[in-house]
Every structure is written in C-alpha cells, then in structure tokens.
Image: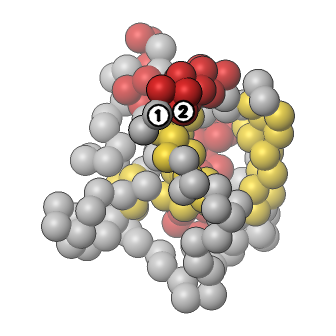
C-alpha cells in the first residue's frame, strides 16, 4: 500500500462519522448516513428482515452516532460499526464480530456491487455458520 493511500485513508477514517435516522418497520426502508464528506442514502430490503430491523434498531438507539469508518480497502469497500472505536462511555458494548451476531440472510436476488450495503462477518474457517456481525457493516465501492 503506498504512503499517499495510507495517509488519505487515515484522514478519511476520522472525517467520516455517522449520524443516521430511520423509522422502524417501513417496507424497503431508506436510511441516510450523514458524514463529514456528504450524505449516503441506503435502501434496506424486506427480504433481509433480521439485518434490516437490527440496523434500524441500532440507528434509532444512537449506536452509530459519531462512529467512524474504521476500515477502508481501496477498490473494495469502506467499513464502520466497530464498538471498540466508540468513545470511552460506550466501550462496554460487546465485540460485534465475536459475540453479537445475526444468522445469515443470503439472498440470490442481491449481490455485491458498487453501493451495496453488507454486514461484516468473520471468515468461513472461524464462522462456518456464516453469521453476520450485529453492528459492523460495509459499503461496496467498486
């Protein structure tokens, strides 16, 4: 990874903080992620109700307020939702990759493409059930 990308990624992590709002229970709910670099509109599909409802519940609870995109992989994705990067007052939230997970809801109708929202998860060798993180998500960039 070149030095320019490392520096720009570091700056990007701190500039993109989330502030979301969304009602619970709407069909194909749209949410807005407001960052210091602009707004990202996301559509949550009814065909993945566990993930949709969990994401909206976290938004409405304020979990994502002030959280940063902590992982950026050029030409792939940007990731947010790690409770370990929250302020000290919120650090008692469990590790969402190891303890707070949701059963997978893979749907052949949807696939990874630019702009897609997906839940983070550990690899198949560690996570053979392919359970998703309860808090961490990423947005596909290309």
**56 left or right of 91 in image:** right
**132 left or right of 43 in image:** left
Label 2 sits on a secondary structure element that is helix
Where residue 5 sits in the image (x, y, percent)? 54, 32
Crowd class of label 2 (few under 14; some 14 to 19; many from 20; radius 10 Å): few
Point out the image quarter for the N terminus: top left
Q: Which color scheme is applied? A: secondary structure
Whether 136 is drawn above or below 35: the answer is below
Residue denoted by label 2: 5
**138 left or right of 82 in image:** right
Where residue 88 sits in the image (x, y, percent)? 41, 11
Q: Residue at x 32, y 48 (%)?
A: 97
Q: Residue at x 80, y 57 (%)?
A: 30
- Residue farthest along the bottom direction in this orientation: 108
Q: Do the numbered discs 2 and 1 sit on residues whose CB atoms are within 8 Å?
A: yes
Where residue 93 sits in the image (x, y, percent)? 37, 30
Whether 60 is drawn above or below 109: the answer is above
Front one among 75 and 43: 75
Between the residue at mark 2 and the residue at mark 1, the CA separation in whole angstroms equals 6 Å
Crowd class of label 1 (few under 14; some 14 to 19; many from 20; radius 10 Å): few
- Residue farthest along the top direction in this orientation: 88
Where residue 121 sits in the image (x, y, percent)? 36, 57
Residue denoted by label 1: 2
Q: Residue at x 25, y 47 (%)?
A: 98
């Amino acid at each position: 990874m070149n030095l320019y990308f490392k520096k720009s990624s570091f700056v990007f992590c701190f500039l993109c903080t989330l502030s979301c709002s969304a009602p619970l229970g709407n069909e194909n709910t749209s949410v807005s992620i407001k960052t210091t670099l602009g707004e990202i509109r996301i559509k949550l599909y009814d065909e993945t109700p566990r993930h949709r409802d969990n994401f909206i519940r976290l938004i409405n609870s304020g979990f994502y307020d002030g959280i940063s995109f902590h992982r950026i992989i050029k030409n792939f994705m940007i990731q947010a939702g790690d409770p370990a990067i929250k302020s000290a007052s919120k650090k008692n939230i469990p590790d969402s990759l190891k303890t707070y997970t949701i059963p997978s809801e893979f749907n052949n109708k949807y696939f990874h493409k630019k702009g897609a929202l997906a839940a983070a998860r550990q690899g198949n060798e560690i996570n053979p059930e392919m359970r998703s993180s309860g808090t961490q998500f990423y947005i596909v960039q290309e």
